[in-house]
Amino acid sequence: MSNEEKILALLEKMERTQEKHGEILEQHGKLLEQHSRALEQLRDDVTGVKVRLDLEVSKQLSALAEGQETLLETLASKERVEAVEDDIVLLKSTTKAINREIAELKKAQ
């Protein structure tokens, strides 16, 4: 095999290698396009989920705030509760005293 034949054989081999590299690059390009589309779809999905979550959380927080507001409106004040507790203590002691007096009166009969 002469030098020219060897050079031609090497050139043909290099040409085939370049063709294979070109095919591989083309496949990689297609995969990259597919990945780009998939990534874009994922971004859209995530954005949609974020928007829905924001709306749901906002609605739920509003409902909680309304509920808390209602509770605060219907809740008795601390002063009022203390006054009622004082009245209950007074009523209990008065009731006990009255019961003692009734018991004494019954004994006296």
Image (spheres, rainbow, N blue to C red):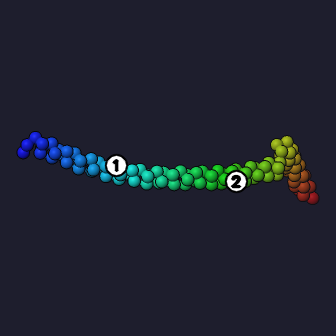
Element carrying mark 1 = helix
Please provide percent x and percent y for residue 83.
87, 44
Q: Which residue is mark 1?
A: 25
Q: Residue 44, relative to residue 77: is it above or below?
A: below
Please provide percent x and percent y for residue 76.
83, 48
Q: Which residue is mark 2?
A: 59
Please state which amino acid type lies under the numbered disc 1.
Leu
- Which quadrant of the rendered structure holds the N terminus? top left
Mark 2 or mark 1: name the one nearer the start of the chain.
1
Which residue appears at 79% of the width and 52% of the height? 70
Q: Residues within 10 Å of mark 1 (few under 14, many from 20)?
A: few
Mark 2 or 1, which is nearer the eye? 1
Which residue appears at 39% of the width and 50% of the height? 29
What's the CA distance linking mark 2 and mark 1?
Answer: 51 Å
Tag on residue 89? none
Q: Are marks 2 and 1 in contact (CB under 8 Å)?
A: no
Q: Is residue 62 left or right of residue 97?
A: left
Q: Residue furthest left?
A: 1
Which residue appears at 75% of the width and 53% of the height? 67
**13 or 33: nearer the viewer:** 13
Please state which amino acid type lies under the numbered disc 2.
Lys
Q: Residues within 10 Å of mark 2 (few under 14, many from 20)?
A: few
Q: Can residue 38 be seen from the camera position used here?
A: yes
- Number of labelled discs? 2
Please provide percent x and percent y for residue 87.
87, 47
Q: Can residue 93 be seen from the camera position used here?
A: no
Q: Residue 109, relative to residue 32: is it above or below?
A: below
Please provide percent x and percent y for residue 71.
78, 51
Which residue appears at 70% of the width and 54% of the height? 59
- Which quadrant of the rendered structure holds the C terminus? bottom right
